[in-house]
Image (cartoon, helix red, strand yellow):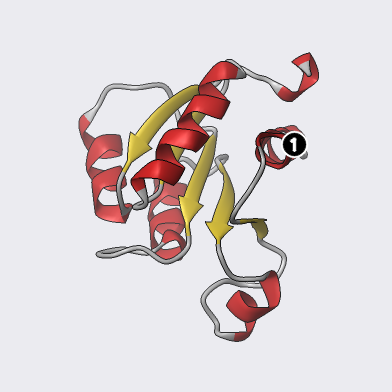
Amino acid sequence: QESMGGTETILLVEDEESLRKLAFKILDKYGYFVIEATDGMDALEIVNREDHPAIDLLLTDVIMPKMGGKELSEKLLLKYPKAKVLYISGYTDNAIVNHGVLDEGVSLLQKPFSAQSLTQKVRDLLDKSQG
């Protein structure tokens, strides 16, 4: 279980409060530093306003009011080019790719997710070529 944890900074963006709180609790328990935002606009405001450590991973819902996950990730990567992105969605990979919402090959975590699948995906992504 230890190996699933980390100390990286995660920007968690999810408009569904119960889900956001759940993900926060899980990641916080595993040692990550988690910054919460309710949507893409909120996330960018936080990132631009606060003096916080660089974002290592963006964990974001794909479909949100105001600004979706893809647009948010594009903007965030301009500021943190090394950041990894993990999308959360109630849809399958295929549905999202086929509708042009996301590009192929992106990392997607399906709702509802377990603590195990969340921490595993986050860790795998953070450990992927740090170069």
Q: Look at the picture and state if 84 lies above or below 1.
A: below
* Residue drawn 59% across the image and 76% down it: 96
Quadrant for the N terminus in the image:
top right
Kindly identify the amino acid type of the residue bearing the numbered disc 1: Gln
Is 38 drawn above or below residue 94 in the view shown?
Answer: above
Q: Position of residue 89 (x, y in %)?
A: 55, 61
**In the figure, residue 74 lies in which quadrant?**
bottom left
On screen, residue 1 versus residue 97, left or right, reads right
Q: Nearer the viewer, residue 78 or 103?
A: 103
Residue lying at 56% horizontally and 55% vertically, measured from the top left: 87
Position in image of residue 39 (x %, y %) = 31, 52
Picture quarter with the C terminus: top right
Write the residue at 47% across / 63% down: 62
**On screen, residue 38 above or below 74:** above
Please report the residue visible at 45 percent of the width from the left and 27 percent of the height from the top: 34
Q: Is residue 64 left or right of residue 7?
A: left
Q: Is residue 106 left or right of residue 29?
A: right
Residue 79: image location, x then y, percent: 40, 43
Q: Judge from the rendering whether residue 98 lies leftward or rightward of residue 63; answer left or right.
A: right
The front one of 48 and 70 is: 70
Q: Position of residue 56 (x, y in %)?
A: 54, 33
63 vs 95: above or below: above
Q: Nearer the viewer, residue 36 or 43?
A: 36
Circle 1 crowding by C-alpha within 10 Å: few under 14, some 14–19, many from 20: some
Viewer-proximal residue among 125 and 20: 20
Identify the residue position indicated by label 1 in the image. 120
Outermost residue on the bottom side: it is 99
Answer with the quarter of the image where residue 30 lies.
Answer: top right
